[in-house]
Amino acid sequence: MRRVYLVLAWLVAAGVVVQVAAIAFAKVGEDHLVDSGGVIDKAFVESAQGGTTTFVGVEGEAVHAMNGMMVLPVIALLLFIASFFVRGRGPKLWALLVVGLVALQIVIAFSMFDLPYLGILHGVNALAILLVAIVTALKARRTPPRHETVPTAAGTAATAASAGTEPRDAVQA
């Protein structure tokens, strides 16, 4: 289950990269539209949301919205569920941090339509999600295996669980 946890943590990080690429594609497409004489006003935005207006980059906004509202939250929740089956230092805490930051990101996304300056916090929080997801994955990689082999006095190997000792407490031959 540790491998599932690890893959899910990396998927969250990859999802943030997809988010950045998608919104960059959308915004550059909008800039290209304006540079070539197009106008972006309320009517244009409403028709673009309805799917009747297209421009290079409109797909980026759709990918950004779907990934941020559906895909990333589901992956984050699966990461949290998987954390209950992973041994180690703090997998539940790190997964909960990912879920909390993703939830905060969604709240900021809906709030920034009324408070545009929250867009700055939206970008910073995205970086925080990326950082926490990477740290979560790296910590999962460093978790020791469940059973380590321990040399015994007889020269045979035994697992730490069956020998009842930690490797540092093993009898030296």
Image (cartoon, rainbow, N blue to C red):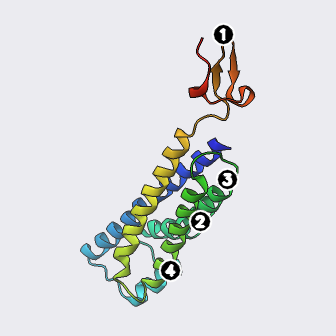
Q: Earlier in the sequence, mark 3 or mark 2?
A: 2
The local secondary structure at tag 4 comes to helix
Q: Which residue is farthest right?
A: 162
The local secondary structure at tag 2 comes to helix
As drawn, 170 above or below 21 = above
Real-space CA distance between mark 4 and mark 2, rounded to the nearest whole angstrom: 22 Å
Q: Amino acid at mark 4?
A: Gln
Real-space CA distance between mark 3 and mark 4, rounded to the nearest whole angstrom: 36 Å
Q: Earlier in the sequence, mark 4 or mark 2?
A: 4
Q: Amino acid at mark 3?
A: Ala
Q: Is residue 56 visible?
A: no
The local secondary structure at tag 1 comes to loop
Q: Nearer the viewer, mark 3 or mark 2?
A: 3
User: Image quarter for residue 157?
Assistant: top right
**Along the horizontal axis of the image, is 159 left or right of 98?**
right
Of residues 58 and 63, the one drawn nearer to the viewer in this rendering:
63
Real-space CA distance between mark 1 and mark 3, rounded to the nearest whole angstrom: 38 Å
Give the residue pinned by disc 4.
49
As drawn, 82 above or below 37 = above
- Residue at the image point whose x is 46% and y is 57% from the top: 132
- Residue at the image point whose x is 46% and y is 61% from the top: 129
Give the residue pinned by disc 3.
82
Q: Nearer the viewer, mark 1 or mark 3?
A: 1
Q: Residues within 10 Å of mark 4 (few under 14, many from 20)?
A: some
**Along the horizontal axis of the image, is 169 left or right of 154?**
left
Residue 116, horizontal then vertical, whole percent: 36, 84
Q: Residues within 10 Å of mark 1 (few under 14, many from 20)?
A: few
Give the residue pinned by disc 1.
155
Give the residue pinned by disc 2.
73
Q: Residues within 10 Å of mark 2 (few under 14, many from 20)?
A: many
